[in-house]
Amino acid sequence: MQVPLLDLKAQYATISDECIRVTREIYESQYFILGPYVEALEKEVASYCGASYAVGVSSGTDALLISLMAAGVGQGDRVITTPYTFFATAGSIARTGAIPVFVDISPDTYNLSAQRVNATLEQMTPTERKSVKGIMPVHLYGQCADMDGIMEIARAHDLVIIEDAAQAIGSEYGEKRAGTFGEFGCFSFFPSKNLGCFGDGGMVTTDSQEQYEFLKILRVHGSDPKYYHRFIGGNFRLDALQAAIVSIKLKHLDNWTRARRENADTYRRLFEQAGLGDVVTCPVEKEKRHIYNQFVISLVNRRDELKAFLNESGIGCEIYYPVPLHVQDCFNYLGYGKGDFPESEFAAEHTLALPIYPELTESQQEFVVDRIRHFYANSL
Ligand SMILES: *Cc1c(COP(=O)(O)O)cnc(C)c1O
């Protein structure tokens, strides 16, 4: 049996007619950049997330970068974030000229620990603390970070919050959805996200009308009106084709999320039935609505061997992320070293993402769990 990590062809089969019809319409119109499809999607995503406004951008990475630019983050500033995330989180901070300040995660959720953010701020010199302009929490794997704790710190220190919600569209914390706690919520439509397009795309949500207008100016090289530049922006535009595809998919998102959550429950049941409780730790559902962009298990030992074994058995699985950002070569200049963030390092060494996509069948999941049981059979 083959179990890919993600099966986008199965999803496409259910929406192909609509996609072909709408792309043909756009081909006929020859109207490719921004325009009515992008505006329609912006309204739909704002409404879906519960934000006042949304601005379509070229990728999740650019959503982070344009938000930092709109917040006025730059040279000499500091932004607090997690080292256990996709590169773009800290990469975008560094690209503005600001210094990423890493703070370790909570081991149960893999998300930035608010307590540790507090401790880091307390250890800083007054000058350093004054240079901290914001926090960029990541809602990793589809579960919201501790937003009560983080917002409290933001209020106490007057910090801007830019949420990296690239993996978390529709994820809920309390009564609100990811991307609506901070000043900016950043989303990605990269194909492997829960709401993916047919290429690159992203979105920024905000409740501030002022920031909404500013983001739209920054998106077109900071020009307002055309060819007059008071700001230095960039080309952060979203294509009509991508927007139209995302609009089609958005109508299915809640059903897909429900299926992902059911698959997560099925894994939990199967792991327990297999007696793997001592070897495999399933994700902790701490917040109300985990959307399972990834189903990441933690293993007591032999993680790399298990990954190779599963791959040989025809099962897709992946390590997110094998090297925490504080020990990436490009961030040597920040002066961190191995041992600085033990929880992130532990997660990088012990976790593995299993297939969780909506179209996954129960028999595929049984096969995955059975192979893992077989692998650990001698040590049980
Ligand atoms: C995917 C992702 C991004 C970047 O999104 P792109 O659309 O690929 O640029 C940023 N942060 C996190 C946590 C991501 O998973």
Image (spheres, grey):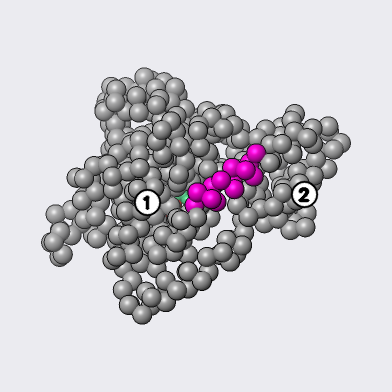
Magenta residues (range): 253-265
Residue 58's spot in the image, x, y percent?
Answer: 37, 59
* Rendered view: 295 above or below 45: above
For the residue pair 124 and 20, the one nearer the viewer reads as: 20
Q: In which quarter of the image is the N terminus?
A: bottom right
Q: In this view, does 232 lie to the left or right of 31?
A: left
Residue 248 or residue 66, whichever sits in front: 248
Q: Please tell me whether mark 2 sits on a helix, a strand or a loop.
A: helix
Tell me the kind of residue under disc 1.
Answer: Val
Q: Mark 1 points at which residue?
A: 45
The answer to whether residue 137 shows anywhere in this view is yes
Q: Do the residues labelled 2 and 1 touch (CB within 8 Å)?
A: no
**x and y percentages locating residue 182 in the rendered image:** 33, 36
> Seen from this angle, which residue lies furthest bottom?
28
**Among numbered discs 2 and 1, the one appearing first in the sequence:** 1
Residue of label 2: 367
Q: What residue type is labelled 2?
A: Phe
Q: Is 260 covered by the magenta stretch? A: yes
**Dot 1, crowdedness within 10 Å: few (<14), some or many (≥20)?**
many
Based on the displayed image, in which of its 4 quarters is residue 37 positioned? bottom left
Q: Is residue 96 visible?
A: no
Q: Is residue 145 above or below residue 258?
A: above
Q: For residue 93: magenta?
A: no
Q: Residue at x 74, y 39 (%)?
A: 270
Q: How crowded is mark 2: few (under 14 residues within 10 Å), some or many (20 or more)?
A: some
